[in-house]
Amino acid sequence: MANTYNKGAVSIFAVIFSTLLLTVLTVSFMGLMISAQQRAINNDLSQSAYDSALAGVEDAKRVVRACANGNVNACNALEAASDCQVVARAKVNGSVDQPETVIASNSSSGQSFDQAYTCVNIAMDSVDYLFEAQSGRAHVVPLRATRPIKKITIEWFTLEDNNNAPARTPTSSPASSTSLPPIASWNSSAPSLIRAQLITPGESFSLSSLDESSSSRTLFLRPATMSNGTTSGMPTANIQVSQAAQPRATSGDGAYTNSVSPVVCSSDYANNGFSCSVTLDLADDQVISTGASNNALLRIDSLYKGANVRVTLHSQDGAEIKFDNVQPVVDSTGRASTLFRRVEARLRMGTDFPYPSYVADVQNNLCKNFSVDDTGVISAGCNP
């Protein structure tokens, strides 16, 4: 009889433990399902908030374009103090002055998704100019500034450009050589070579004056060696433009060698997140005045590979100078339910014109042999 009782007790304990185990497993699975569902909801809300912030950026573009086209309300809104209501005050596309702008949808007024952008600020003057340089394509940076320009700093090549790897020396060939290596010999983990052309014709100019050395000067900034940490205190981090830059070669006598300027770069991107940093120091008689900056340009070519580039302007005492209506900065905050996302976007004024990088670009031999005088064209035989 005692054995029977014992067997019954074992069965009861087995049922109890099995029930507890199933309960724990059920509660755990329910917790995982609820957690996964909450993550999915948060991801959807985060994406919706991000989309709302982008909608604020698009409306900011409309305000800037409207001001450029002469809309007085838009211009007044841009000139007023930033208080998150720039787009609302501009009254572009029927916008009204309200705490937030609800994002409309195809199904309703937008309330079903509870999306809106709550704050949009537009700064027309930026402390720097950012862009992604493409290999083989010229990018022209307007140097229109709020104060006279004495120095121009160019920083390029980020960790993102190098797939999160340390920057390396381009090649083993001498950096001072005028003969640059072929693209196949350039280290894939090395920063690009920057061709920087300063075009500073002054407040008034003619096309012929652009051939003068004081109006158009070019430097080839070649990464030469790598260093740990920032390179701001090194000699090659500051280049005297009047001594290093070459004028446009027009004589055809080989007087201009266009020699490269070796640059020490940072292997760990310590120059404000960039590997290479060079400051172009203008001579005292070449300082770009505020009026002359309206016609001043910096043409940048990223050779061998592309790179993220940052350009900043400085005065005589080294203080940063803001770009004047060159690359407006939009700070937009979007909301979806109670989740917020904030984005910063840069707007480029004017049209994105594809400036030519070469006079002729051919894969095979090029044959060109002719001359022109007052009486006509004199042709000649050509044997490439």
Image (cartoon, helix red, strand yellow):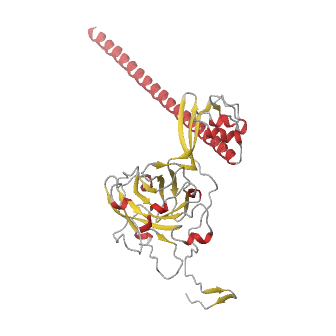
Q: Which residue is drawn at 36% across and 71% down?
A: 176
> What percent of the width, then of the height, locates residue 150?
46, 56
**Please, is residue 68 above or below residue 175 in the view?**
above
Q: In which quarter of the image is the C terminus?
A: bottom right
Q: Where is residue 192 in the image (x, y as percent from the top left)?
A: 44, 62
Please give left or right for residue 206 compared with residue 9 in the image. right
- Can residue 125 be seen at all in this image of the molecule? yes
**Side (left or right) of 128 relative to 353:** left
Q: Outermost residue, left direction?
A: 2
Give the percent coordinates (x, y) of residue 208: 60, 72
Report whether residue 189 is seen.
Answer: no
Picture quadrant where residue 334 is located: top right
Estimate the x, y position of residue 375 in percent, counting from the top left: 70, 88
Q: Which residue is nearer to you in this view: 220 or 366?
A: 220
The quarter of the rendered structure image containing the N terminus is top left
Q: Which residue is drawn at 43% across and 56% down?
A: 157
